[in-house]
Amino acid sequence: LSRYRTDFHEIEQIGWGNFSRVFKVLKRIDGCMYAVKHSIRQLHLDTERTHALMEVQALAALGYHQNTVGYYNSWFENAQLYIQMELCDRSLSITRSSQLLSEEEILKAMHQVAKALQFIHERGIAHLDVKPDNIYVKNGVYKLGDFGCATLIDGSLPIEEGDARYMPLEILNDNYDHLDKVDIFSLGAAIYELIKRSPLPKSGPQLLNLREGKISLLPGHSIQFQNLLKVMVDPNPVKRPSAKELLEHSIFDRFDRP
Ligand code: ATP
Ligand code: MG
Ligand code: MG
C-alpha cells in the first residue's frame, strides 16, 4: 500500500533535481495543495539514507520561518525518501525563465533570504546551496528552499557542498571553518547573477574574479549596493558580514517600516 497514493492525489510534476522529482499534489484529507519531493534512486545503503535524511532533519529541527520553504512531513516508501513541503509559485532560477527583476525587487529578495539565513545560522545550520534556483517565491514572499546540502556550522557532520558556481574559494580548498559565511558568499553571488541577468559561468575569468571578490561595475546601481555585494563575496570569510550584520545595513531600512 502506497502512503503517497493513499494520502495524496498527484496533480503534475513541477520540478526535476539531479536526484529528485517534485510534484504538485492535493492532500485528500485536508483538501490543500502541497509539493512532494522524492528521491529518484532507491536508497538501500545506510550511508545513502543517512545522507538523504540530513535534509529533513535540518528542516524539522529548524521549525517554521516565513522565509524558508515550510516542511510538513517525510517518510520512506519503496526505499525512496518522500518530503511533503509548502507549495511555492516558482523559483528565481534565471536559466529557466528570463526574469526581469528591478533592483528594488532583488533587494527585497536579498533582505528576505538574509532573514532566512539569520534564522538558520542562529540555530547552528548552514545551507551550503544558496542560489537563485533555490530561492522560491510564494504570494510575493521569498523563501529559501532545498536543504539537501544543509549541515551543522560547527563542522561535526559530513559536508557536501552545493553548486560550485556559488562556492567561495575556501570551500574549493577544503577549508570549512566559517560555514555561515559560505552562505553569505553564495547569496552575494546569487544576487550578482540576478542583477547581471545572465547565468554565472561554470568556469572562466568571471567566476575566478568573483571568488577574488572582484565584481564588474554595475551601471545604474547605487555605489552603496555595489559595495555591499563586494564585501559579501570577499575572499576572506571573516571580512564578510554575518546575516545579522547584513540585515543591519541601511540599504534594507525601507523594508522594515510598517
Ligand atoms: P538540485 O539538483 O538543485 O539539488 P534537488 O534534487 O535538491 O535539486 P530541489 O531543488 O529541491 O531538488 O527541487 C527541484 C525543483 O523542483 C526546483 O528547482 C523547483 O523547480 C521545484 N520545487 C522544489 N520544491 C518546490 C516547492 N516547495 N514548491 C514549488 N516547486 C518546488
Ligand atoms: Mg535545488
Ligand atoms: Mg538540492
Image (tube, rainbow, N blue to C red):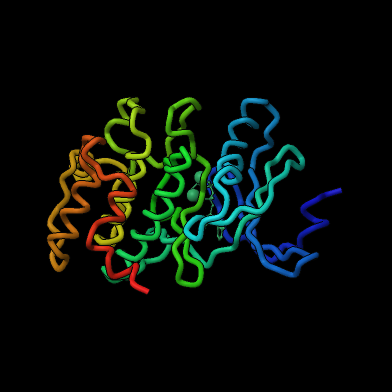
Q: Which residue reaches farthest front?
A: 258
Quarter of the picture containing the C terminus is bottom left
Task: Tell me where residue 26 sits by quadrant.
Answer: bottom right
Q: Which residue reaches farthest bottom?
A: 258
In front of the other: 199 or 48: 48
Residue drawn at x 41%, y 58% is 93
State whether residue 172 is above or below residue 28.
above
Asked whether, in this view, residue 51 is left or right of residue 257, the answer is right
Q: Residue 14, percent across and down?
A: 58, 61
Q: Which residue reaches farthest right?
A: 1
Residue drawn at x 12%, y 57% is 217
> How many marks are shown on the rendered structure?
0
Residue drawn at x 79%, y 65% is 28
Q: Residue 73, percent across and down?
A: 69, 50
Task: Tell me where residue 212 sits by quadrant.
Answer: top left
Q: Residue 108, percent across and down?
A: 34, 66
In front of the other: 179 or 62: 62
Residue drawn at x 67%, y 33% is 43
Q: Residue 141, percent across and down?
A: 46, 67
State whether residue 52 is above or below residue 246.
above
In front of the other: 78 or 110: 110
State whether residue 22 is above or below residue 210.
below
Task: Tell me where residue 183 sits by quadrant.
Answer: top left
